[in-house]
């Protein structure tokens, strides 16, 4: 604890009562203790909004009975310590709204009791660790507004208890994992403002508890799955700024009550409104935030023959007067373009 005080400029803390003295640890501000076999051990450490400026010391791994750590809204920098993998009993971790950088420690796969993990609004990089599939008790995961990249781990299909998952405003690429159909408890899902592409998984029809779904600001293509008609409790569906096409499946609406109170946003796609009743067309045009389309265009960049490939979104749907995203012709080894 003295290491934490020293490494985060303890003299500037908003409240540092008894922090650098020999007084009983359990009486210090922000610390809660619990009795283990006749000994008081540090159980919770909470110093949010306390002007911590500096780095997190690996030596806190010695607090091996840690149940929760709340250090959000400070000015903590540098990386998350690998050594904290000793906290096998931790259930709540919150360091959002700091300036933490670097990768997420793979050693934390030992946190098999973790239920709430909040690291949003930092500068974390690298992929999400596939080894964290051991976090099968996870309920709430916030990692939005970082610089995380690569793909969403298919192994995290083991998170069958997840309720809220938010990784918007990062740099994730490739597809939405079909294996995540196992997450049947999920209520809120947010992957907006990334670089995800290809199609929406039909297998996610198993998400019958979903109420809020955010996929806007990606490169997703093709149609809305008719199998998602099982999402009868959906309240918010935000899919604008993609390359979705065709009609909104009527099956997604016909068996849902109170449709008029729902929030749907499909702008900047090529989804048609025509073909519904006049009342439905009026609602889709006004309340669903989507202008009726009379014509849309498909750009299909196809590679014929041998010698190379197209890098980028090879199928793009555009509204009239729209502009496609760039693609690149990449020659194979020993080939050049003439």
Image (cartoon, rainbow, N blue to C red):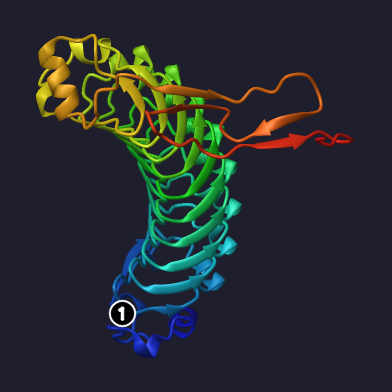
In the figure, 146 relative to 7: above or below? Answer: above
Q: Which quarter of the rendering shows the C terminus?
A: top right
Q: Nearer the viewer, residue 100 or 69?
A: 100
In this rendered view, identify the residue nearer to me: 24 or 323. 323
Q: Furthest residue to the right?
A: 334
Q: Residue at x 35, y 88 (%)?
A: 12
The x and y percentages for residue 252 are 26, 15
**Judging from the image, what secondary structure is the residue with disc 1 in?**
loop
Q: Which residue is mark 1?
A: 28
Residue drawn at (57%, 40%) of the image = 326
Q: Nearer the viewer, residue 151 or 82?
A: 151
Q: Quadrant of residue 216?
A: top left
Q: State which quarter of the image contains the N terminus.
A: bottom left
Question: Residue 79, image x and y in percent?
Answer: 54, 66
For disc 1, the neighbor class at 10 Å (few under 14, some 14 to 19, many from 20) is some
Q: Residue visible at 49% across and 52% down? A: 88
Query: Position of 11 compared to 236: left or right?
Result: right
Q: Position of residue 225 (x, y in %)?
A: 38, 16
Q: Is residue 313 left or right of residue 309?
A: left
Q: Quadrant of residue 318?
A: top left
């Amino acid at each position: 604890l003295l290491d934490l005080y020293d490494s985060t400029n303890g003299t500037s803390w908003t409240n540092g009562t008894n922090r650098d003295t020999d007084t009983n640890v359990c009486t210090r501000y922000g610390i809660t203790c619990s009795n283990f076999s006749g000994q008081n051990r540090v159980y919770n450490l909470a110093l949010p909004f306390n002007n911590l400026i500096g780095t997190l010391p690996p030596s806190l791994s010695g607090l091996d009975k840690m149940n929760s750590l709340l250090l959000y809204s400070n000015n903590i920098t540098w990386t998350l310590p690998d050594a904290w993998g000793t906290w096998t009993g931790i259930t709540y971790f919150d360091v959002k709204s700091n300036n933490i950088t670097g990768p997420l420690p793979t050693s934390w796969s030992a946190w098999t009791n973790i239920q709430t993990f909040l690291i949003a609004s930092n500068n974390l990089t690298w992929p999400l660790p596939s080894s964290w599939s051991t976090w099968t008790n996870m309920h709430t995961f916030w990692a939005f507004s970082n610089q995380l990249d690569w793909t969403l781990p298919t192994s995290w299909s083991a998170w069958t208890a997840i309720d809220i998952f938010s990784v918007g405003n990062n740099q994730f690429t490739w597809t939405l994992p079909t294996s995540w159909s196992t997450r049947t408890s999920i209520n809120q899902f947010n992957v907006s403002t990334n670089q995800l592409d290809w199609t929406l998984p039909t297998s996610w029809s198993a998400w019958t508890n979903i109420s809020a779904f955010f996929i806007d600001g990606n490169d997703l293509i093709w149609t809305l799955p008719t199998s998602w008609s099982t999402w009868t409790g959906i309240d918010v569906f935000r899919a604008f700024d993609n390359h979705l096409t065709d009609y909104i499946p009527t099956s997604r609406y016909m068996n849902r009550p109170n449709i008029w109170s729902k929030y749907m946003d499909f702008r900047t796609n090529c989804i048609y409104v025509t073909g519904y009743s006049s009342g439905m067309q009026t609602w889709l045009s006004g309340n669903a935030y989507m202008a009726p389309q009379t014509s849309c265009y498909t750009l299909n960049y196809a590679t014929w023959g041998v010698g190379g490939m197209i890098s980028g979104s090879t199928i793009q749907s555009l509204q009239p007067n729209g502009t496609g995203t760039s693609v690149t012709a990449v020659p194979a080894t020993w080939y050049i373009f003439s």
